[in-house]
């Protein structure tokens, strides 16, 4: 069975005995009070910053921890419990009587994250990703490794891909793999127990490099076979910058990374409900938290989606952990909870992430032969689902496989959203949005890309929507209706220039064939696809088929329109796209990672006609600087009325437009 029926799951959880899943100790190692240079933040006044470690235990046999992969094989203490420890940082009003009652948890991204003093909220970050290297500036967690029941090491296959070798390079670090291997190391340095293949392209034919011609070693200072090193590979003939190298080896000692979900659950639950830890140390915000809200961007947003899917929004007492969540620019599940997982993956080849349900509404995945399911199955069974505000932009369609979230794996019909979910799409934006402003001239291209960086922002819309999420959770105020592209409105089409209606812009690169494809992989019989759990036994995994993907269509300018448009997009200065093209190297002509692009309009009609650009020029659109500023003001006023822009941001944007050089005639040079 792929999942328990909701009623059966609910009965199981209700009948479960008390489990030892809790925070046993919290250590506040540094207190900065007041923090933030003593600045006061509105009615909340001054904030203080607390940092330290938290320590927890988990009962490996408890139903609430059953979805943690390999928890039953993790090292245990004398009481039979699994231990972990993590870092945290808390920003809170010094006078908690001024606090809002909201705990705002920001999920760190690859360990990066700091609490933010905001609106009287208690802001929290903590470590959850067990394969992040500990550093003073990052949030980390220490989790145990899994071992066989007889104490012997667990092993399994790992695939690593390497591209864009420097000219003359003969050594790659495993951490340079496209999947960024952090802790995975070979069980043996014997190359006959591994394989290294060379490919001319991602799906091109393989050429096996004989095991005598490469080594797990460092050859940067010592000639081949170099200095033995489990963290590096060296090739006798060097590495070709134009080729892809595919390494498959047997790794040992997998970390039980899924503990990061339980640790986050229990730390948030402790802050919400506990008075003190087992040693008597007081909870620094005891009795002050009424609501819990979590937000996460990209990898961290995927964490939130999987956290809910695996049932971790229910704590050991059966209470809801977070009342609301905002997964931002995140379209997949987090591929962290299987053996030898790479938690920092970015939808690269062979990485899981879109292999289970990625949709909020019920959908039967008939293409892959799986029953009706959703990310909310477990929380619905226990009545612990949060209010969900999902936000994302164009790049997520092009490079992070957002299509099945909306239309499933057959791309035939919109998947309807449940009542507790709002979806807001930011059209024509890059990953996380651009710098904003009203600058006619294009910025430099992102490193390695053809097109200039996309300036179309998301920040202002996100500030307004964060406020809406807080009001939804704390006061029951319904946020604006969802806004996103749909199949039934003709707004989602195949990812090619003709289907999208993308204009023929002179010198613009082709977008045909650049989308990151959605593959159905065969990871082997030990892999549990619905939960992205178990173990991969086929490496690299064969591709069963390519699944269809759709993207938003565009207007005559090449700009997407469906969704929550920024003020800049409503009064555009060019074409803003959620894709870019790689300029050189192994991936030349393919999508350029997490980067969108920008193609400015011609400034004048004469310039446009000379180049053959079909898009009206800036002077043809707006006539004068004053007219452009008036258009910005009109767009900003409407966005405020629609609750997608705060008034303070509207005022700032209007002032920026007034100060811009859009259609401002250059001043004549004074004659001497």
Image: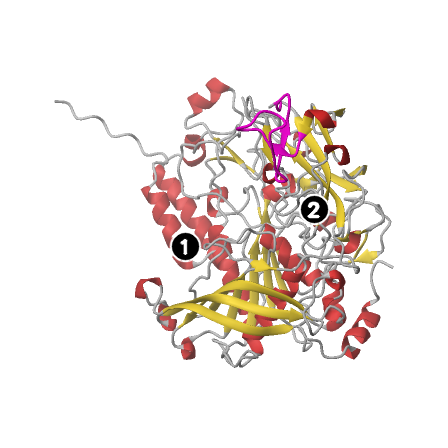
Magenta stretch: includes residue 539: no
Foreground pick, 396 / 645: 396
Q: Is residue 448 above or below residue 134?
A: above
* Residue 643 in view here: no
The residue that mark 1 highlights is 649
Image point (61%, 46%), residue name: 182
Image check: 646 left or right of 237?
left
The residue that mark 2 highlights is 489
Inter-mark Cα distance, 2 to 1: 31 Å
Magenta highlight: main SS: loop
Image location (x, y in percent) of residue 595: 55, 38
The magenta region covers: 215-240
**Image quadrant containing the N terminus:** bottom right
Foreground pick, 659 / 357: 357
Dot 2 alpha-carbon crowd within 10 angstroms: few under 14, some 14 to 19, many 20 or more:
few
* Residue 21 in view here: yes
Image point (50%, 78%), residue name: 281
Image check: 342 left or right of 625?
right
Q: Earlier in the sequence, mark 2 or mark 1?
A: 2
Provide the secondary structure element on which disc 2 rests.
loop
């Amino acid at each position: 069975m792929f999942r328990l029926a909701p009623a059966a799951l609910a009965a199981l959880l209700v009948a479960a005995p008390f489990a030892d899943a809790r925070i046993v100790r919290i250590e506040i190692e540094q207190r900065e009070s007041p923090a933030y240079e003593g600045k006061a933040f509105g009615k909340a006044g001054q904030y203080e910053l607390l940092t330290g470690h938290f320590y927890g235990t988990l009962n490996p046999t408890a139903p609430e921890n059953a979805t943690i992969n390999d928890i039953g094989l993790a090292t245990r203490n004398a009481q039979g419990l699994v231990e972990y420890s993590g870092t945290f940082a808390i920003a809170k009003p010094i006078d908690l009587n001024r606090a809002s009652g909201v705990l705002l948890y920001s999920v760190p991204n690859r360990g990066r994250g700091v609490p933010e003093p905001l609106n009287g909220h208690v802001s929290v970050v903590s470590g959850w990703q067990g394969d992040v290297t500990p550093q003073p500036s990052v949030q980390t967690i220490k989790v145990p490794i899994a071992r066989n029941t007889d104490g012997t090491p667990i092993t399994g296959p790992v695939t690593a891909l390497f591209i864009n070798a420097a000219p003359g390079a003969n050594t790659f670090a495993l951490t340079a793999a496209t999947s960024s291997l952090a802790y995975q190391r070979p069980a043996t340095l014997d190359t006959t127990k591994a394989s290294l293949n060379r490919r001319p392209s991602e799906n091109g034919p393989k050429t096996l490099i004989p095991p005598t011609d490469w080594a797990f070693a460092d050859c940067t200072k010592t000639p081949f076979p170099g200095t033995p090193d489990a963290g590096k590979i060296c090739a006798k003939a060097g590495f070709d910058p134009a080729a892809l190298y595919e390494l498959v080896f047997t790794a040992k000692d997998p970390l039980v990374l899924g503990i990061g979900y339980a640790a986050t659950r229990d730390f948030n639950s402790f802050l919400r409900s506990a008075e003190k830890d087992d040693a008597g140390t007081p909870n620094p915000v005891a009795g002050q938290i009424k609501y819990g809200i979590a937000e996460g961007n990209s990898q961290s947003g995927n964490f939130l989606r999987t956290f809910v899917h695996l049932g971790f929004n229910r704590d050991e007492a059966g209470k809801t952990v977070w009342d609301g969540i905002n997964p931002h620019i995140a379209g997949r599940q987090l591929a962290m909870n299987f053996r030898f997982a790479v938690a920092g993956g970015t939808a690269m080849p062979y990485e899981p992430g879109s292999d289970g349900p990625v949709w909020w509404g019920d959908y039967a995945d008939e293409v892959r032969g799986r029953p009706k399911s959703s990310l909310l199955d477990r929380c619905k069974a226990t009545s612990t689902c949060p209010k969900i505000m999902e936000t994302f932009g164009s790049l997520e369609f092009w490079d992070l496989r957002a299509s099945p979230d909306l239309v499933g794996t057959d791309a035939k019909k919109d998947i309807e959203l449940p009542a507790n979910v709002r979806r807001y799409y930011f059209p024509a934006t890059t990953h996380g949005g651009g710098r904003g402003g009203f600058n006619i001239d294009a910025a430099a291209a992102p490193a390695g890309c053809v097109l200039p960086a996309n300036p179309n922002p998301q920040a202002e819309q996100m500030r307004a929507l964060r406020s809406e999420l807080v009001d939804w959770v704390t006061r029951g105020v319904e946020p604006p209706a969802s806004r996103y592209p749909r199949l039934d409105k003709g707004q989602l089409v195949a990812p090619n220039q003709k289907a999208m209606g993308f204009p023929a812009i002179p010198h613009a690169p082709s977008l045909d064939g650049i989308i990151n494809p959605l593959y159905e992989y065969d990871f082997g019989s030990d892999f549990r696809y619905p939960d992205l759990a178990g173990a991969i036994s086929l490496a690299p995994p064969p591709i069963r088929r390519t699944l269809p993907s759709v993207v938003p269509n565009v207007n005559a300018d090449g700009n997407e329109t469906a969704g929550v448009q920024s003020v800049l997009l409503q009064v555009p200065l060019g074409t803003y796209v959620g894709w870019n093209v790689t300029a050189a190297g192994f991936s030349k002509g393919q999508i350029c990672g997490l980067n969108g692009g920008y193609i400015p309009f011609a400034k004048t009609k004469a310039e446009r006609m000379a180049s053959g650009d079909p898009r009206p020029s800036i002077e043809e659109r707006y006539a004068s600087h004053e007219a452009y500023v008036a258009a910005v003001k009109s767009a900003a006023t409407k966005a405020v009325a629609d609750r997608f822009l705060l008034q303070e941001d509207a005022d700032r944007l209007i002032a920026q437009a007034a100060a811009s050089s859009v259609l401002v005639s250059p001043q004549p040079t004074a004659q001497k």
